[in-house]
Image (cartoon, rainbow, N blue to C red):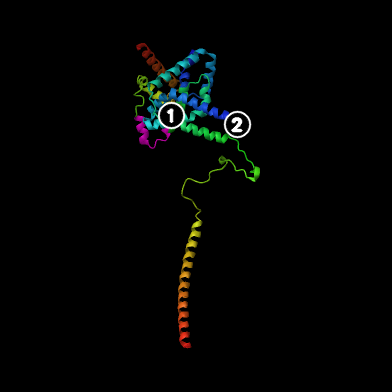
Amino acid sequence: MNTQWQTSGSMSQSKLSAVSTLYANYAAKLFGYIFEVVKNQSVAEQYLVAVFNDVPNEIDDFLKTGANALCRLQMMARKKLSEFFETLDNETDKQALQNLQPLANNKYVAMMSPLQQQVFYAIHYRGHTIAQVAAELSKSNEEVKKVLKQCFTIIRNGRDNERLHR
Amino acid sequence: MKDYIDSGALEVFVMGCATDEEVEELLYMKAKYPEVNEALKQLEADMEKMAQNAAIAPPPRTWDKIEDEINSLILTEERLNKPVQFRAYDTGYGGQPKTPAADQYIEVEGASSHMRLHKAWRYVFAAVFILGKIFLGFAIYFYLENRQAQEQIKELKTEIKELRR
């Protein structure tokens, strides 16, 4: 019986240690991502804490071979942030948020066209599905996927250019 | 396979907005074609690079908050998973009763200094208050009556003494 408790205790410790490693590697990236959406350090910190508090429940998904931890964390954050958008108090807040330029500081996104930015922002920051974005822009799902692919091409080209200039 | 990579399905997966069918299809393609796996890794690297570009160090005490929260969750989980052991308290050696371990008691004393009562108690309190007033009135009345009677007895005694003379 004692051994069982000790095993459960050591499992809990290993979970905490796994979360600690994830935090060390990805907290800054995730905090930057959340901050781009909420534009407030204190609010962004609360979301970061909420995301990492949920990590022990989903630690098995992180430990799967081939799973990308940052993408997984961003998905969790996106889910939490969708609640942020839903709980905006009034129309003025919603309008103010829509008028924000969340991507202005991101040099990769700054290279995208307005349509590409619109698609990338809706999916990456607001957590919209392809179907939602397609309906918003009156386009087909395939067209939206193509635009998203173009966004990644721009990011990769920017990345490659950086390598060349080093 | 190239058409699949060019369709944007990998980008949709990396962004976490793929449907269940799309995820299944991707996992199948990834297992079957190494090129798909390679393209996926490239996209993940793109995401990492972009996130790196926007990275901001979180406030210094953030990890402590997360650690505290997770530790408290772990403690709660361990308590819930711990099997409950019920046993009768028998007397120990030498007739000394065995005392149960301290952690087997449930703390019932609340932290609040206030208590809540059912509204029906207000009628009881009102009745007690009114009865209290009535008894006080009777007490004063009988005290005065008693004092008056004492005075009358005193006067009568004086009169009797005078008559005897």
**Residue at position x 46%, y 21% from top?**
B14
**Residue that carries the numbered disc 2 in the rendered image:** A2
**Residue at position x 54%, y 34% from top?**
B77
Q: Is residue A30 left or right of residue B34?
A: left
Q: Nearer the viewer, mark 1 or mark 2?
A: 2
| Range shown magenta | A84-99
**Residue at position x 35%, y 32% from top?**
A96
Query: Magenta span has B144?
Result: no
Q: Is residue B118 left or right of residue A87?
A: right
Mark 2 — on which chain does it sit?
A: A
Mark 1 — on which chain does it sit?
A: B
Query: Magenta span has A89?
Result: yes
Of B94 and A45, which appears nearest the observer? B94
Q: Position of residue A34 (x, y in %)?
A: 40, 28
Where residue B63 is drawn, which disc sits there? 1
Tell me if residue A130 can be seen: no
Tell me if mark 1 has few (under 14), some (14-19) or many (20+) residues whose alpha carbon lies within 10 angstroms of its own. some
Question: In the figure, residue A24 lies in which quadrant?
Answer: top left
Q: Position of residue A23 (x, y in %)?
A: 45, 25
**Residue at position x 45%, y 70% from top?**
B140
Residue that lies at the very extreme toward the top in this rendered image = A164
